[in-house]
Each structure stands twice: as structure tokens, then as C-alpha cells.
Amino acid sequence: MTSAAPHSELPTRPARHRAYADVPDAQWSDWRWQMRSRVTRLQPLAALIDLTEDERRGIEGRRDAFGFAITPYYLSLIGPPGCPVRRQAIPHVDELRTTPWDLVDPLAEDEHAVTPILTHRYPDRALLYVTHNCPVYCRHCTRQRKVGDVDSAPARDMFEASYDYLARTPAVRDVLISGGDPLSLSDARLAEICGRLRAIPSIEVVRLCTRNPVTLPQRITPALVDALRPFHPVFVHTHFNHPAECTPEAGEALVRLADAGFNVGNQMVLLRGINDDAATVETLNRWLVRHRCRPYYMLQCDPVGGTAHLRTPVAAGVDILDAMRGRVSGLAIPQLVVDLPGGGGKVTLTPQRLVRREGAKRVYRDVQGREYTYVDEPL
Ligand SMILES: *Cc1c(COP(=O)(O)O)cnc(C)c1O
Ligand code: SF4
């Protein structure tokens, strides 16, 4: 049995790359400054980080298809090659490798689009894409076909068409505001979108899907939570993948959201060599729970082109759940989800516990592999 993961694996003080040492605190904490100061080109990045040849070739090879962007904050978390933050943010030559199973739109989101920015796959939920901008372009992004492409930014008439569709489709009770990262929009614009959705009586819940608490926690300001609080219930889905992202600033952002009544959940993506082991997931999830963010999904990486080197075997996720159950608080255990390529939607996977059936008897194995019988014979 592995021992409890120590807290010392977590970053303990606000990190800053030495190049930013003289930036005044007020500027460093200003999300607009962080957005303006993002590193998006090879030369400036090479001046800050000692890039490997594989990274340089990845940056050049992916420049047109899926460029990169990194906030000074997230860049400051980057360590030597192999660092989990680095591998999520800096292109690598392995992104040029493809498999025959790679897809451009693995979840067939465009096929299930009812307006250019609204995907309606499940009866009661719909997904609205409000921007293609993100503070950091995650190398494993499923929507890399869309994000970063400023020319394809959603237009006003697409929003109107989407509100119209939702108003005449009362089966939709739950709308996910996604992108890109919705928090790239201004507070006023976000409040307007939430207001338009909440004005549709059949919509019960709004969800905001954002990686800003991870890549730009400065964005979670008192003004932002005040602007969106009137539209509760608003659920926030964020996307922490590794304890190296669990900084004091990130923790503050989560607690600020929770204090303002947002119900915060985390959707991590399993990434090979980054977070595909139980100890890493446990450390991450215990930190999230301490900051009142509930691990919601642990997602199998979608087969989008350029991510083959980051994908894990499906069994890896099942093994992680198997190792956690019984040993770790259930609050820290997410559901393992595979989003079926081609638009089949999400399915959950769980460790196989049933060993055999003997008449009404069901023999299950516990977490240590011992067998126990449940007699499945109610009166
Ligand atoms: C994931 C997803 C949802 C939300 O699914 P939940 O399982 O309810 O979190 C809704 N619509 C689409 C298109 C999705 O991909
Ligand atoms: S924040 Fe989300 S949408 Fe943006 S690049 Fe990362 S995974 Fe993709």
C-alpha cells in the first residue's frame, strides 16, 4: 500500500520566473496584463526557457495547425523537460506523429451542432461555444480545430440563433458555457450571456467550463464572482491535471468561487507520464477537495490528432480507480469517462468487482482482492 502523499509535493509559494521578478505585484495580479503578456512565439519562449530540440521542432511544425500561448503565471510553473506543466503547454515534435485513429473532431461536435456555436447531443443538455480564446493552449485540447483561430470567433447572430433554439427546445435544462475558455470574455459579456440563458424559463442550470483557475487564477476576481452570482445555480467545471498546478493563487481562486456560491467541479484528463498514476491523482484530488472543488470526471484523452503521445491505455484509468477506492475518501474519487469517438457520448468505466455468480449469490472482490458474497434475494 502506498503511503499518503505528502503535501510537500505541492508548490508552497507563489512562483515567478526570474524574468518577471521586477513586475509590480499589482500588474502580476492583473489578468489583463497576464493575457497581454502571454508568450506565443518561439524566440521569446526560447529566451525564457531552455528549449529542447524536440520542443523547437514541435513549435515550428505546429505553428500553423495549433500554435501555443502561455501566461507568465503558468510559464512560471514550468520546470525542466518532462515537467507536467511544460508538457501540457509547450509543443513537442511528438505532436507531428499520427495514428490511423486520430480524428479532427473526435466527438462529432460539429455534426451535432444545431447552430454554429451550439451542440445538442444529450436530451437535456447543450453546449454553447462562446469564444475560441484561451490563456494557455493545452496540448491535449480536444477542440484544437477551433481554439486560437481568431477569424472564426462566434458572431452575434450565432448567439441569437442559439438563444432562439434553446427557447423553443424546453427539453434542454442544463447549458454548458464552453469554448475556448469563456473567461476570456469580459465580466459584462459573461453576465449578458448568463442573463440571456437564465431568461429562458426551461433552463434550470448553467455551467461555466473554464481552465482559468489553473492557467490564469488572477481572472477569478471579486468583480467576476459578483457579476455572475445573480445567475445561480451556476456550476463551474475546471480542469486541473497535476499537483504542480496547485498553487496558493489557484487555491484562492477556487475558494473565492465556492464562497460566492458556485459549485465547483474538476474534470481532469488522463495524460501519459503526467498524471496516469494513483498517487498523483490522489495528491491532486485531495488538494482540490481541501479547496472545495469536487473531482467530477477523470477523462480518457480523446483521439484528436497530435495527442497520440499523451494518451494512456484505457486500463490505466480503471487501475487508478481500483487503487483509490476504499483507501481514499470517496469525495476525492472521480468518475472515469470515455467520450465515445464519433459522437456516442460519455460512458463511465469502473473496476470489475464481480468475480462470479452462484445462483442468487454474487461473489465480489474487495479492494484487497478478498472475496465476499452478497445474496441477491430480497423477500
Ligand atoms: C460532456 C458534454 C455534456 C455534459 O455532460 P455531463 O455528463 O452531464 O457532464 C453536454 N454536452 C456535450 C456535447 C458534452 O460533450
Ligand atoms: S483551456 Fe480548454 S479549450 Fe482551451 S486549449 Fe485548454 S483544453 Fe482547449
Image (cartoon, helix red, strand yellow):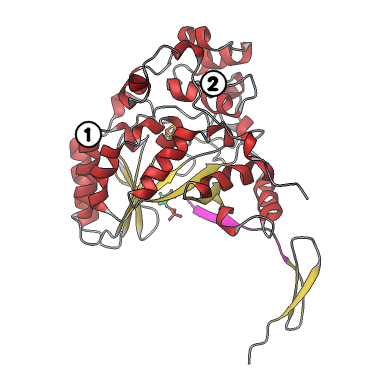
The image shows residue 92 at horizontal and vertical percentages of: 58, 20
Q: Nearer the viewer, mark 1 or mark 2?
A: 2
Q: Amino acid at mark 2?
A: Pro
Residue 213 image label: none
Which residue ends up furthest to the bottom in the rendered image?
A: 379
On screen, residue 126 versus residue 13, left or right, reads left
User: Is residue 348 inside the magenta stretch?
Assistant: yes
* Residue position for label 2: 91
Tell me if residue 114 can be seen. yes
Q: Earlier in the sequence, mark 1 or mark 2?
A: 2
Q: Which residues are magenta?
A: 341-353
Point out residue 83 in the picture as x, y percentages from the top left corner.
62, 25
Q: Position of residue 218 (x, y in %)?
A: 37, 31
The residue singled out by tag 1 in the image is 155
Q: Is residue 261 left or right of residue 359?
A: left
Predominant SS along the magenta part = loop
Residue at horizontal 60 percent and vertical 19 percent from the top: 93
Q: Is residue 93 above or below residue 217?
A: above
Q: Nearer the viewer, residue 89 or 254?
A: 254
Could you tell me the amino acid type at mark 1? Ala
Secondary structure at numbered mark 1: loop
State the residue in front, 203 or 46.
46
Q: Residue at x 68, y 45 (%)?
A: 278
